[in-house]
Amino acid sequence: MRLIRQVFGQGPVRGERPAGLASQQPRVWPLAVLLLLLTTLFAVALERNAALLLQTYGCLAIGAFFWPRSASEIFRPLVYSSWWFVLWHFQWVHPDFHAYMTGAGRIAQGLAPWGPGVPYLYPPLLAQVLFGLTRLFEALGSSDPSTSVLWLYRTAQWVALVVFCEKLALFVPLGLALLLPLAFEPLWSTLWHTQVTIWIGSLLLAAISSPAWLGALCAGVAIHLKLYGAVILVVWALAGQWRRLVAGGAATVLIAVVSFQLLPPSPLWSQWWAQLSAVTVQRGGLRLPGLFGVLGWLGNETLFGPTRALLLLWVTLLGVSAEYRWRKVQALGDNLRCFRHLTVWMAAAVVFSPFAWHHVFFLTLPLLAALLARDGLPHVAWPLFLSIGMVAGEVDVPALSYLRGIGTAVAVSVGYTAWLPNPLPLMRAVWTDVRAYIREDADWPAPRGGRHAVPTVPTQNEMADPSKPDFPAEPWGAEKGSELDRAS
């Protein structure tokens, strides 16, 4: 048991993060910079066996950087080297990456990245970055700038995956954060489709565990990759992180202004919103393999809006109740509260989406990891992990197609209720706060006597004659400790 604890670690139960874990985590940015530079060098050369050489040198660099000094430190180099090895074996270029490059190509032609019949559906930031990288590799003399951009894109995916695992390990056991993605099919679909979903997940986790200015920047970039990133603003609002909320909103607006101003003059916002709306109303359900969002089942236009509103209201009420308990009863730190909210709302964003391709379900992984790490919940969380993480992405069998959506919907509800196993302490804390608020504000003359009379401060004559029937049994404010104090 001691060896297992040393290898896999113990996730935090209370507080912001485990003691000493932040100091134990390696700073991966020097390795990330080295691999990005190494990739750029080989991408410019594009000589024979360049991909194999880059794969070999990258694995050696990762192994040397995470040099293990004990048995408990061997998992990082093994897992991260495996991810690097796997990424460089995805040689087939998926149409999703071609859609990104199509947006970059339209910017090169002086056009907006989206338009009728154009597969690019996202905010312009990603297309602008890919356009800039294409110009960079052209200036460096690359014989195939598009392939060079793809290589750098793959390395950036590896960096995002490492950041995701390291940030997740701040709140769950390290072994769980490293090994759980290996058996999670939506992650493999994300890599296969060369999607940006990994970046969204890593940026959102970094936003809640980084300084305010850096967290705001991460939030802004995540939102401009895909609109799923907007859940971080909801999380900061629920957790009362007003400084981060304002900074994140300002960063989002600033990036929007800069990115849209860099495009050619045209009604860009209206064009993008019109094309996005045209896609979101296509709720094909089983008619389109891979669209397994819960709300995608509701092809009826009149049912879609009210159902999403009810689900949003339900999750919001659960979030407010959980936030009240975490503050008043358990006194949890800001980071841990934000992490719990974020895991639920990342999964809820998948549920609220009109359609969700299977790679989007990668955003449910932090919630499943948090539930599996909680004592007494693996027997509940493991079936959810199987239903979400083990179903093949392109399967078009009704029973299996709906399984992933149902598992996500259940996980969202369990995500909050798992941290509210007993509602009685919460109800007692609420009642105590309401009663204290009423008593503190009861400065008006109250009727004497009666069953519901409000006690008042006794006069000198009343204190001299405590045998009067309407004399309070105890002086005002002499309670022996509130229910909230006893619960804490």
Image (cartoon, rainbow, N blue to C red):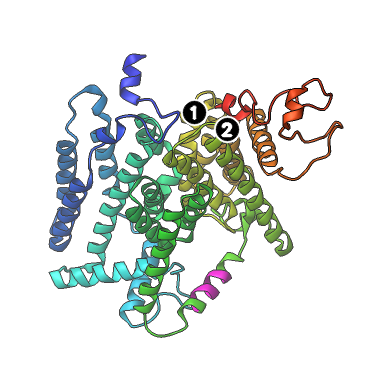
Q: Is residue 176 left or right of residue 307?
A: left
The image position of residue 446, as x and y in percent, is 79, 41
Amino acid type for the residue under numbered disc 2:
Ala
Q: Main secondary structure of the magenta part?
A: helix
Quadrant in which residue 222 is drawn: bottom left
For the C terminus, the image quarter is: top right
Tag 1 near tag 2, CB within 8 Å: yes
The image position of residue 137, as x and y in percent, is 19, 68
Q: Which residue is mark 1?
A: 374
Answer whether residue 53 is magenta in the image: no
Instruction: Count residues near mark 2 (Cα–Cα under 10 Å), then give few for <14, some for 14-19, many for 20+.
Output: some
Q: How many marks?
A: 2
The image position of residue 461, as x and y in percent, is 76, 29
- Residue nearest the viewer, comparing 428 with 136: 428
Amino acid type for the residue under numbered disc 1:
Arg
Answer whether residue 272 is magenta in the image: yes
Which of the marked residues, 1 or 2, is nearer the chain's N terminus? Answer: 1
Q: Which residue is mark 2?
A: 418
Instruction: Count residues near mark 1 (Cα–Cα under 10 Å), then give few for <14, some for 14-19, many for 20+.
Output: some
- Residue nearest the viewer, comparing 397 with 445: 445
Q: Is residue 400 visible?
A: no
Highlighted range, magenta: 271-278
The image position of residue 323, as x and y in percent, is 55, 41
- Outermost bottom residue: 265
Quadrant in which residue 96 is drawn: bottom left
Secondary structure beneath label 2: loop
Whole-number angstrom distance, CA of label 1 to CA of label 2: 9 Å
Per the rendering, the mark at residue 478 is none
